[in-house]
Image (cartoon, rainbow, N blue to C red):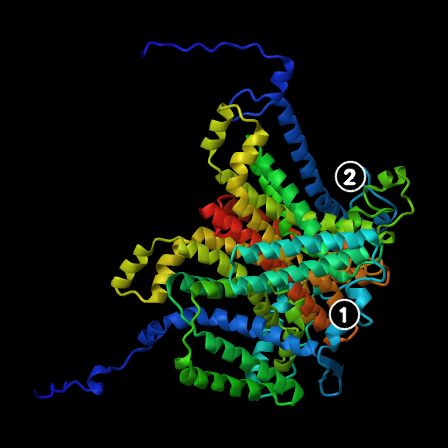
Amino acid sequence: MSEASFKFEETKRSLFERLFESPAIGKMSPVSKVVAYSMLIFWSAFVIFPIYWVVITAFKDADTVNSGPYFIPFVDFNPTLDAWHTMVNADPFCDGYAIVRQLSLLVYNSAIYLLSPVVHLAPMEPQICKIYQTFTNSIVIGISSTFFCITIGSMAAYALARIQYKPKFGNIIMFVVLCIIVIVTTIYAGIPWYIASAVALVLFFLLARSLGKHFTATVGNNDILFWMISQRILPPIVVIIPVYMMYQAVGLLDTHLALIIIYAVANLPIVVWLMHDFFAGLPIELEESAQLDGSTRFGIFWDIVLPLTRPGLAATTLLTLILNWNEYLFAVFLSTSKAQTLPIMVAAKNAGERGTLWWEMCAVIVVMIVPVIFMAIFLQRFIAKGVLLGAVKG
Amino acid sequence: MTEPKRSKVTNKDLSYTESWPEWFDRHSRTFFIAPAVSLILIFAIFPTFYSILFALSRVKFSGTGLKFRFVGLDNFLNEFTGPERVHFLGRIETISVIGWLFIVVVLGAVIYWLYKSYKSGSSWIGMIGRLISASMTIFIAWLLAGTLLSGNQWGTLLTTLFYVIVGCSLQFLIGTALAFLCSQPIKGKNFFRVLFFIPLMITPLGVGYAFKMVLDITKGPFQPFWEMIGLKNWAWSSDAWASRWFVIVGDSWQWIPFVFIIMLAALENVSRDHVEAAQVDGASSVQIFREIIWPQIVPVAVTVILIRMIEAFKIVDLPNIMTSGGPGIATESISLHSYFVWRSNDMGSSAAVAYLLLILTVVVCSSFFNYVVLKQLRKAKA
């Protein structure tokens, strides 16, 4: 048997067969290869072209943009740095010292704030470069909001994957009723919001303690998880006006903190959804043995669970960071000048009295998309490993 | 029998001073979940109820702040029967014969579906849910018949549904097709994968402006082409349907990568053995896709559509940038409608419109989730 040899016979195949049938398992026939590659290349062109056009427009001047399409730099038109120059030169504070100035402003103003009970000094006026300030705003808001959101979201996701919660259904109803009472008394009866909400909060805890014993219906972990994830359905336009009012009441409008909090809330459902899946997939034995050794829950979470989910954590972080970086609707409602982010600056180039300043706008867009493209390449590597797939399946 | 001796251990002996870390650890179940829950309660649930009150009031600016006057359901009725009706629902005056026919067909189908689920014995909660979905379907069918099928103007409700339904199906089809191509044995798979993924990560604002530039008739890169086919003096904003497709192109460019990347992962998870066995048996690739691959990826597919739908209902940046909702209100989504009303300082109506969007989104998405996604997931588990 071992000496049996197999002969491959070259079967005669017509041209048609050779073109349309695959030569071997796991290979493609020539025609389908041609079709597949041409479709892929067509789509690549469709994906690249708008990006390419934005990039080259950022290096055009007003005349080149307005006199019709020019495609290739150095051949069709001479690339200029006009857009970049105006972005920097139009602002008297955008020079080599922009960073130093902003840092000293920060230090000086915080010192003044700390000294304000003792001596009154006028805070320094923000003499800072607009593009630089906007860029740092975007970075600061994006990163801190991502950090905030990931911390809170992964803690909640871990808790929902490992600890049994049984909130009483009656307490939830009670909370909602108290919420509505607070709103009604604040806006129709004119009671200050802080008094109303403090009274309601105290009432809620007292009632939950006393009445809560009589409620029997409870909701489980899956209900809480579903509730958190389903917050993503909520269109931002529904909550944005009340949130605006709330921020106005506590004086948070046009600050970094306002945007950081609201971005974190907007992305919390995604973080909880993705992270819950990773945590639920971990073997529980590790945590149990650590618990026997006397670790605290936070210790287990920090030392064992988080390092184990590092790829998932990285992917979720990148995704949240990109979503925060691109956010527009909340930013346009809640920030006017000090906390302005890059998307607002892009949109602002549209409203000039000279019409849309395409070349300047494109320069800002390029500033926005370059970091994102690098992040996307990293993120793609995680997603390719099926990081998102598990959550989608579940 | 003597009474059992009472234990000498008093409460004082049992309690020992708990250190802070121990107390912290004992309550860790609360500390783990409390921040997330309270954030959502304060910034999502509370504002949602707050905005009901906005929607039920006439809001006026006064010297000290806002003044609320309770007006009941007036803001909502305005959208359905009052002066805002054309804006929200469209112009429904006469319904053509085709329109009536369409309504009757949809009505029949819905009643048959309700009857069938009643016979199969679903719970009363399930029946209430089905009744809500059914009435929403009939309402939308009536709208469609009254506007599109009778040649009348659309409102923002149907425009939003157009973005959701046409946009989602287009993106799903193209995204899955691309994923299927990339799952074939081709060279440069990683390159295509990274490249096709990038548009998703670009800010919607940038996408809007980029497409506004690229598809510009007089200054855009296709200007020679437009001139060749005689559209030199034409503009996207001159035609309602062209503008709607214009928005869909931008939206698809951005969101096809999302479908693509997840469907590709799903396709690569399909076991190669089954596919190769079928190939050896001489099955055609259409058969293989239909009989082997599709049943395995269908749970992921419906979930992707659901996620995409949820996001599609919120569309606001693209129509705002590319067409500013024009011509007229042809490309205005409900979010944008609410935003424009807010800008004209009518906060009550704005909140009412936003609330109607919330109701529409919840009903459509949960119908899809209950009747399609859950069914497929159950089928996959069985």
Q: Are marks 1 and 2 on the same chain?
A: no
Q: Residue at x 49, y 53 (%)?
A: A314
What is the number of the mark on residue A72? 2
On the rendered structure, is A150 left or right of B139?
left
On the rendered structure, is B184 left or right of B224?
left
Q: Secondary structure at mark 2?
A: loop
Please state the horizontal and vertical placement of residue B230, each as a whole percent of the image: 91, 40
The residue identified by callout 1 is B79
Q: For marks 1 and 2, give the one nearer the viewer.
A: 1
Q: Residue at x 60, y 46 (%)?
A: B259
What is the number of the mark on residue B267? none
Please state the horizontal and vertical placement of residue A23, each as a whole percent of the image: 55, 20
Structural crowding at the residue carrying mark 1, measured as other residues with C-alpha within 10 Å and reported as few (<14), some (14–19) or many (≥20): some
Q: CA distance from mark 1 to mark 2?
A: 51 Å
Between B153 and B239, the one nearer to me in the picture: B153
Q: Residue at x 32, y 59 (%)?
A: A287
Q: Is residue A164 visible?
A: yes
